[in-house]
Amino acid sequence: MKSLILLFGLTIAAVAGEVDELVAKIEKAREPKNNVSIRSYISRTMTFTSTLQVPLQIDYIYKSPNKIKIITRIRGAGDTIQAYNGHTAWEQLADGTVRLLNGPTADYLQFFITLGNPAVKMAECFSKIEIISSNSMVDKEPCYQLECTPLPHFRQKTVIYWVSRNDFLPRRADMEILTTGAPVPMTSWFVDYHDYDGLIMPKETRTASPQSPVISRILEVKVNQEIDNLEFNPPASF
């Protein structure tokens, strides 16, 4: 019996060691290749959906460690904005209406910011990481399949990642988005990673959800631009 307990303990330690080693490789793969700290970035994407005849232009404005502003532009309509300034989450609708965000929508926005921080450690996002499979496939790419449990304060569902065994960058993510109403399942595929002045990002992201399939392509990325903190605050008139 003692030998069985010892063997079980060694097996658990081996599994934990394998996860730690894989996490270290994933974090290493995201590090800037030019050894420059990423303080901010602005990513401009063109996004196509089956529900709209014209594409969306979406700008992601990020400033370390926890500020983000997402501007969605539709030709012929007003811009919509979602933002978080480190303390307050807010939204501006196409008609100019501004409102504070709280509950699930604000929770998800803060989780999204943390995932988007190029310097973040996985332990800052997830309380538990398990390897489900060491030999899964995504578009003919051999991958590890990981089950990642978000930290409790994010109040998000488990995320399943497929991470390439070759470069240790994500190729697919399955998650349920908690914003308003029932959880919305979403699957994203990440294609054609590029080095944008040290920031490693997929040039194309394909997403499947109950609302509509979405394809987003990066048009340009600006790294370490000077961005005033006021950029992330609600309008002064609010």
Image: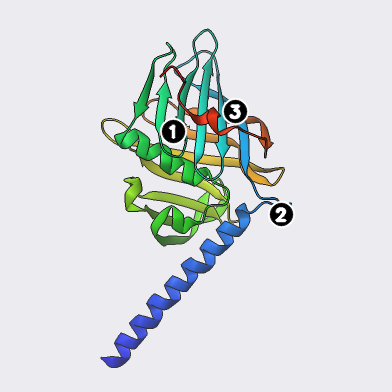
Instruction: Rate crowding at label 1 as few (under 14), some (14 to 19) or many (20 or more) other CA atoms within 10 Å.
Output: some
State which mark lies toward you, 3 or 1: 3
Residue 215 to residue 196: above or below: above
For this orientation, the residue located farthest to the front is 236
- Amino acid bearing label 1: Ala
State which mark lies toward you, 1 or 2: 2
Instruction: Rate crowding at label 3 as few (under 14), some (14 to 19) or many (20 or more) other CA atoms within 10 Å.
Output: many
Mark number displayed over residue 70? none
Location of the C terminus by quadrant is top left
Q: Earlier in the sequence, mark 3 or mark 1?
A: 3
Q: Identify the residue at image location x=55%, y=28%.
A: 231
Q: Earlier in the sequence, mark 3 or mark 2?
A: 2
Front residue of 106 and 8: 106
Q: Secondary structure at mark 1?
A: strand
Front residue of 126 and 205: 126
Residue 52 in picture, x, y percent from top left:
48, 15
Marks 3/1: CA–CA distance: 17 Å
Q: Secondary structure at mark 2?
A: loop
Q: Identify the residue at image location x=32%, y=33%.
A: 102
- Amino acid bearing label 2: Asn
Q: Which residue is mark 3?
A: 45
- Amino acid bearing label 3: Thr
Q: Which residue is mark 1?
A: 208
Q: Which residue is mark 2?
A: 35
Location of the N terminus by quadrant is bottom left
Q: Earlier in the sequence, mark 1 or mark 2?
A: 2
**Left or right, 222 with reference to 85:** right
Can residue 8 be spotted in the picture?
yes
Q: Identify the residue at image location x=38%, y=39%.
A: 108
Marks 3/2: CA–CA distance: 25 Å
Q: How many marks?
A: 3
Q: Identify the residue at image location x=28%, y=92%.
A: 2
